[in-house]
Amino acid sequence: MHSLSFFQKLVEAEIQKLNFREDPADLYDPIRYMLSLGGKRIRPSLVLMSCELFDGNIEEALPAALGIEVFHNFTLLHDDIMDKAPLRRSKPTVHTKWNNDIAILSGDAMFVKSCQMMMHVNEKVAAGVMSNFLESALRVCEGQQLDMTYQDAASISINQYLEMIEMKTAALLACSLKTGALIAETSAENCDLIYTCGKNLGIAFQLHDDLLDVYGEEERFGKQSGGDIIANKKTFLVLKALELASSSQEKELRQWLTVKNFDEKEKVNAVKNIFMETGVKEKAEAEMENYFQKSAAALNEVKASAEKKQQLISFSEQLMMRQH
Amino acid sequence: MHSLSFFQKLVEAEIQKLNFREDPADLYDPIRYMLSLGGKRIRPSLVLMSCELFDGNIEEALPAALGIEVFHNFTLLHDDIMDKAPLRRSKPTVHTKWNNDIAILSGDAMFVKSCQMMMHVNEKVAAGVMSNFLESALRVCEGQQLDMTYQDAASISINQYLEMIEMKTAALLACSLKTGALIAETSAENCDLIYTCGKNLGIAFQLHDDLLDVYGEEERFGKQSGGDIIANKKTFLVLKALELASSSQEKELRQWLTVKNFDEKEKVNAVKNIFMETGVKEKAEAEMENYFQKSAAALNEVKASAEKKQQLISFSEQLMMRQH
């Protein structure tokens, strides 16, 4: 089984080779730009890794792997418009560099291209691959809509949050692993198990991201962190803190969540202080570990070589940046 | 062969039966709303008609026919955002009734749904149907981008305009006819011919629309017309008038195309007067007839029953509201 960095390099090289038309430039330049911004290429690597896990030919899985990466970048492109995000990976977002109309339309074209790439599989498995992909694509849209709805909601439950990230983030990771399995033509049981593995891994991954936003950067680079806190995002940490807070802590937290004018550093520190008092960092880590174990349990049931399964576990651990 | 109104009623009834999820409401309500606004259901009717022309089973073609209608409505939904259009079929557009973010995202979900419906065909033809659909979907995006680019261009040629409407409008009509042919499993030659038929019909259809905007409503309902003139759209009529105008006529026309404050009725009348002086109505009618004849010529070469082919010609004539 190949290493994560092998898959990432392979995917990156293939992305460089993607040959979009030149005209109309305002349709295809934004697509080239978006794909040139880089990223960890996790989803296509998962496709290839899963294909290899089930003794499939990774060459055959490459177009679909890239298709999922193109789809993922399409969702980022449209999400950036909705979030009015000025930057993506430290570069101007497409709607900032061009404009909203161009961002909408080049996103649409990117989605079409991703579907074309998904159809580039053995005809025997095309219907299954496409159906899995489209079902997951719809989940991602539903998750993004819930995320927007929840941003305006006074309060949501932790279950609602977990359901939302299962759709918005985990569905595509699960889809990636299942795509590789379908292309390798493994059993339906293995396909279901690897999907479950990816779904739980995806939830763990998002919880890790929530934690990283508050605690990650600071520990590792000494940088001011807490973008989610500043933006009042209802992450697991905030929701759990609201649940566990004393009435005075809750009052203070709700004040920070609604105050219009504030000093960013002061707000981040105050909210982090409530996080500490309520012990939600540990709760989030436990929840993440819980989903990580569910993911590993599903993988454990997969019928494949123990050595290859171990590789996928190492990869998941790398994803979580856990040093085991 | 069934009549156009039979197909339209069948499609309308099937659209009523479409069963979208309830939640999230802000994702699926706009889709239901968009599809409830009605329309002539031309594209799905063309799918069914073509399927019947080639002795296919129209029941089998229904999901794909609806898929193309859902896709068409997705493009209208996103186009309305880009055009900042307040109304669609006399009702508020989705981005007006909800907001831009919801319109972007429910459009995306609508596109996913349309792909799912396109895959609802006999597995034997799925790859061909999907490849034809996605290629056409990309043409539609390219055409919409060219339309936006041309709106800001000082001047474009008539050939550029014809190329643009071939992509933006004709590609999907051609795709519709070819989809029916693919589902009926007719010969590759017939598939190509019916595509060519649809492409030329589509261009004729758009030229007819250009004419209708200036001359149609007025003649038939006595209403003030000329929306394209008011919006400075570079239609065939305007481009041909610029080509044929004397230098003083050209100067006047260019003035009307750039003036910021104007009386709508005065502008429409002045521009129509230049159209009359330059004789562009007749030129546009001749061009439309030319494409209509190209369409009929391709249909003539199709190997199918003469009676059924005649039905498709009648349908095309109805589309053009020609009274033959």
Image (cartoon, coloured by chain):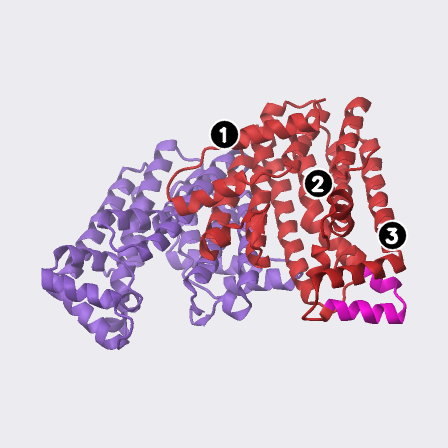
Chain colours: A purple, B red
Label ID, residue B174:
2
Q: Position of residue A80 (x, y in %)?
A: 44, 62
- B273 relative position to A117: left or right: right
SS label for mark 3: helix
**Amino acid identity at mark 2:** Ala
Measure how far apart labels 3 and 2 are at the Cα level.
24 Å
Whether pointer 3 and pointer 2 mark residues with C-beta atoms closer than 8 Å, the reply is no
Check the image and report above or below for B200 versus B19: below
Residue name at image x 27 percent, y 58 percent: A234
Q: Nearer the viewer, residue A121 or B9?
A: B9
Q: Main secondary structure of the magenta part?
A: helix
Q: Have a look at marks 3 and 2 and say if they share a chain.
A: yes
Q: Which image quarter holds the C terminus of chain B?
A: top right
The mark lying in front, picked from 3 and 2, is 3
Of the residues shown, which amino acid type is indicated by label 1? Lys
Q: Chain of mark 2?
A: B
Label 1 sits on residue: B17
